[in-house]
Image (tube, rainbow, N blue to C red):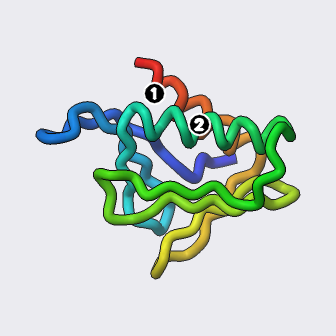
Amino acid sequence: MPQHFTLTPTHHGAFGALATLAIEGQPTRRFTRQEAAIVSRALAAVVCGASDEPQIYMSPIASDCDFSARVLPQGVTIACDGARETPLDWEETVDLARALDCFGRA
């Protein structure tokens, strides 16, 4: 199954190290290490059933697009105003959580 996202380390003059999240058909989002760690933990919690939150939301400081993930029985759906929603199954959700966690810990 093709991956619906990429996470690439980048650098910003004011914010330092950022993780740039690219999702098919959506604007990129850029997370600081702390933001990446927070979103990673939230995604991991819904994957393992430790959280029954219906949505994960963050407005990353270095992004023009918010991060919004609606939790569904088959995974999460990532949305951004003016762009199409992109579904991630549970395996991809775990992959995104791990990638964000690795960046957040670096």
Residue 16, quarter of picture: top left
**Residue 78: percent from left, percent from top:** 60, 61
Mark 1 touching mark 2, by CB under 8 A? yes
**Residue 99: percent from left, percent from top:** 53, 32
Is residue 99 toward the left or the right of residue 18 in the image?
A: right
Q: Which residue is mark 1?
A: 104
Is residue 17 toward the left or the right of residue 54 in the image?
A: left
Is residue 12 toward the left or the right of residue 46 in the image?
A: left
Give the quadrant of the C terminus. Answer: top left
Residue 73, quarter of picture: bottom right
Residue 87, quarter of picture: bottom right
What whole-number distance in Å separates the C-alpha atoms at marks 1 and 2? 8 Å
**Residue 53: percent from left, percent from top:** 76, 54
Residue located at (35% from left, 48% from top): 30
Residue located at (29% from left, 51% from top): 62
Mark 1, Cα crowd under 10 Å, few <14 / some 14-19 / many 20+, is many
Q: Which residue is mark 2?
A: 40
